[in-house]
Structures are given as C-alpha cells and as structure tokens.
C-alpha cells in the first residue's frame, strides 16, 4: 500500500500498533524527557483515533464485517497473498480462527483461496476484485478527509507534520526490515 492510499485511521492504527509493541519491550534506556515526549505523542494519537472514530468516512458505516475481518482484508491488501498460517500470525489469531475468518470473508466474495504455485500443500488467500474495491473505497474516503484537514493547517504546521510523517514512515520501514 502506498503512503497516499492510507486512510487516517489505518495510519494511526499502524502507529499505535508499533507504539504498543514497543511499550511491551524492555526499557531501551530512553531519557525521561524523551519518554515523556513519546507518551505525549501517543496520547495525541489516541485522541486522534477517538475523534476519527466519531467522524468515520461513509464506507466504514456501510461495512458488514467485524473488526478482525477488516484487519484481515487490510493485511491482504498491504501484503498480498498469504498462507493461512502467515495470515494468522499477521492478525494475531490461531490458524483455526484464521480459517474461520477466511471462510466468512470468502462467503462474502471479498477473498479467495488458491493453491500455492510452488507448493500445492499450501493454500494462499488473496483479495478478490470486490475486496480490493472495498479497501480502495475506504482508503479513498480517508485520504479525502485527511486532505481536507491538511488544507486547514497553516504552512508551518503542514511542513512539521510532513517531516513527522516522513520520519514515522521511515521508522516503520526500518522496523519491517529488523528481525
């Protein structure tokens, strides 16, 4: 998924996920002032999530899928076809639970199963065109809302936010390449 196609809530959810993952890790020796700044930023993200939830784009309101099903669709959109076990790890459920989620989403024609071309024992799960359309509709609505909010910012705030998001995207990329 490219940066411009992220919706506000997807971006915030990724940031919060990384933040929460880092909170569970042992103290990395951050100075108290830095830790306080990090807590202040995460508090602002939490508030942004709450405010965004109250102004959810229209496509979110029309969804007839659970949060974990939406998470599954978003993972497949971001990462492409996945085995059931890889998908289960990505959405943090057991393979049996992932299979049930896949069954329900397949019943709604949002995802499909196919055999892995190199290993026929492995089943790959991927989005159908309808699943891709759903994600694109959601992200487009989020991007449009984000663009309207950004247009209301002053030049200095917009530049600062741009620098902050660029740094955050870089940190996310780095975290993906580390074991």
Image (tube, rainbow, N blue to C red):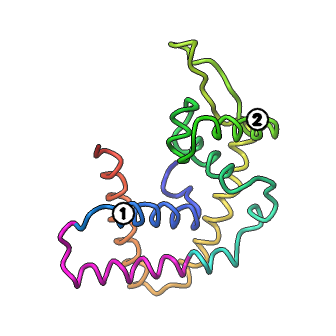
Magenta stretch, overall SS = helix
Tell me, yes or no, whether the two marked residues, 2 and 1, touch with CB atoms within 8 Å: no
- Measured as percent of width and height from the top left, residue 145 is found at 64, 72
Label 2 or label 1, whichever comes before in sequence order = 1
Q: How many marks?
A: 2
Question: Under tag 1, what secondary structure?
Answer: helix
**Magenta span covers which residues?**
28-48
Q: Is residue 129 magenta?
A: no
Above or below, comparing residue 169 to residue 95 in the picture: below
Q: Residue at x 68, y 43 (%)?
A: 132
Instruction: Please tell me which residue is depicted at 59% across the width and 35% down the height of the picture.
Output: 95
Question: Is residue 176 shown left or right of residue 134?
Answer: left
Residue 133 in the figure: left or right of residue 12? right
When the figure is inspected, residue 12 is found, relative to residue 171, above or below; the finding is: below
Q: Residue at x 54, y 81 (%)?
A: 47
Q: Which residue is mark 1?
A: 24
| 3D distance between C-alphas at marks 2 and 1 | 34 Å
In this rendering, position of residue 74 left or right of residue 63: left
Q: Which residue is mark 2?
A: 106
Residue 75: which quarter of the image? top right
Q: Can you give x and y, in whole percent of width and height, for residue 105 in the image?
A: 75, 40
Pinpoint residue 86: horizontal percent, then vertical percent: 51, 35
Please tell me which residue lies in front, 29 or 167: 29
Please tell me how crowded label 1 is: few (under 14), some (14-19), or many (20+) other residues with Cα within 10 Å. Answer: few
- The answer to whether residue 126 is above or below residue 165 is above
Label 2: how many Cα within 10 Å (few below 14, some 14–19, many 20+): some
- SS at circle 2: helix
- Expressed as whole percent of the image width and height from the top left, the position of residue 158 reads 43, 79
> Left or right of 2: which side holds 124?
right
Q: Quadrant of the C terminus?
A: top left
């Amino acid at each position: 998924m490219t940066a411009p196609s992220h919706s506000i809530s997807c971006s915030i959810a990724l940031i919060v996920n990384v933040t929460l993952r880092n909170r569970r890790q042992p103290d990395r020796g951050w100075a108290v002032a830095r830790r306080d700044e990090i807590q202040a930023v995460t508090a602002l993200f939490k508030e942004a999530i709450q405010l965004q939830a109250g102004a959810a784009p229209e496509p979110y309101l029309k969804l007839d899928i659970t949060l974990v099903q939406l998470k599954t669709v978003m993972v497949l959109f971001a990462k492409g076809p996945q085995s059931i076990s890889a998908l289960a790890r990505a959405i943090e459920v057991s393979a049996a639970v992932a299979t049930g989620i896949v069954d329900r989403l397949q019943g709604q024609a949002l995802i499909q199963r196919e055999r892995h071309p190199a290993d026929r024992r492995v089943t790959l799960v991927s989005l159908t065109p309808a699943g891709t359309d759903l994600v694109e509709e959601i992200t487009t609505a989020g991007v449009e809302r984000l663009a309207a909010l950004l247009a209301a910012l002053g030049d200095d705030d917009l530049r600062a936010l741009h620098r902050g998001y660029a740094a955050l995207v870089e940190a996310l990329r780095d975290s993906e390449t580390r074991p």
